[in-house]
Image: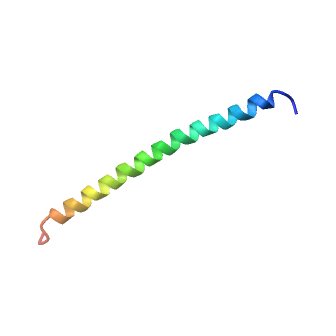
Amino acid sequence: MPAGHFVYIPAILLLGLVAGWILGSRAAADAYAAELRRREERAARKRAPRGT
């Protein structure tokens, strides 16, 4: 195994970790925003008059 692997492999692992962190944080933020929208919609339906 060439000596370059001792730099290349950890660098690729670090790159994957950073990409996963970024994509995961975006997905978590989107899920949180969707949950807030759902809660607001439920609260609006609860406040709306039922006879219409």
14 lies left or right of 29: right
Q: Is residue 48 above or below residue 51?
A: above
Q: Residue 16 location, x and y as percent?
A: 63, 38
| Left or right, residue 4 beside residue 32 | right
In the displayed structure, would residue 48 be above or below residue 13?
below
Q: Residue at x 31, y 58 (%)?
A: 38
- For the residue pair 9 and 42, the one nearer the viewer reads as 9
Between 17 and 42, the one nearer to me in the picture: 17
Query: Residue at 75% of width from left, 28% of height from top?
Result: 7
Indicate the position of residue 27 as horizontal and vertical percent values: 47, 47
| Residue 42 horizontal side relative to residue 48, left or right | right
Q: How many marks on residues?
A: 0
Q: Looking at the image, what colour scheme do you see?
A: rainbow
Image coordinates for residue 2, horizontal then vertical, percent: 86, 29
Residue at 41 percent of width and 51 percent of height: 31
User: Residue 11 falls in which quadrant of the image?
Assistant: top right
- Please give the name of the residue rendered at 47% of the width and 43% of the height, measured from the top-left corner: 25
| Residue 45 as seen in the image, left or right of residue 2 | left
The quarter in which the C terminus is drawn is: bottom left
Quadrant showing the N terminus: top right
Considering every residue shown, the one lying at the far bottom of the view is 51
Residue 40 locus on image (x, y percent) = 25, 56
